[in-house]
């Protein structure tokens, strides 16, 4: 299965990840995370497969995250509310997310791409 690559074209980190995928001849499907964010069911599946805490899926350095004051609110929200919030606005989701049905990477670190996608 090819990699579903949720990204934001203006994001430097996303561009680096895309370049890595291309230079390693990986088959991937680019999905604009703001125009086409993952569905609630899909994001839930990605989070479960990643085995990461849901907090890792928030773009904590993003403007929207700060505007909504999420740093203080996340602890009191249910997992379901957090997922609803993430799918409501692609800019809240940490990017890029690469997912192939079983493996997941969030953000881009070359080492983690090497270990996961090669």
Image (spheres, helix red, strand yellow):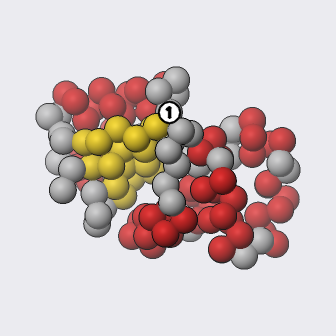
Q: Residue at x 52, y 49 (%)?
A: 37
Q: Residue at x 39, y 52 (%)?
A: 105
Establish if 67 lies above or below 86.
above
Q: Position of residue 15 (x, y in %)?
A: 41, 26
> According to the image, label 1 marks what residue?
8
Q: Residue at x 36, y 34 (%)?
A: 17
Left or right: where does residue 58 sit relative to residue 67?
Answer: left
Q: Position of residue 115 (x, y in %)?
A: 25, 51
Establish if 51 lies above or below 85.
below
**Viewer-nearest residue: 26 or 43:** 43
Left or right: where does residue 45 sit relative to residue 92?
Answer: left
How many numbered discs sit on the rendered protein?
1
**Viewer-nearest residue: 87 or 21:** 87
Can residue 52 be seen here? The reply is no
Quarter location, residue 91: top right
Is disc 1 placed on a helix, strand or loop? loop
Q: Residues within 10 Å of mark 1 (few under 14, many from 20)?
A: many
Left or right: where does residue 22 sit relative to residue 106?
Answer: left
């Amino acid at each position: 299965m090819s990699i579903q690559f949720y990204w934001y074209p203006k994001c430097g980190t996303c561009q680096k990840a895309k370049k890595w995928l291309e230079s390693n001849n990986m088959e991937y499907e680019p999905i604009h995370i703001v125009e086409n964010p993952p569905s609630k069911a899909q994001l839930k599946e990605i989070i479960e497969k990643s085995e990461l805490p849901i907090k890792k899926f928030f773009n904590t350095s993003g403007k929207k995250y700060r505007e909504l004051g999420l740093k203080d609110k996340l602890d009191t929200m249910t997992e379901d509310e957090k997922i609803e919030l993430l799918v409501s606005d692609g800019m809240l989701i940490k990017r890029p997310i690469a997912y192939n049905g079983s493996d997941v990477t969030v953000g881009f670190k070359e080492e983690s791409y090497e270990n996961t996608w090669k």
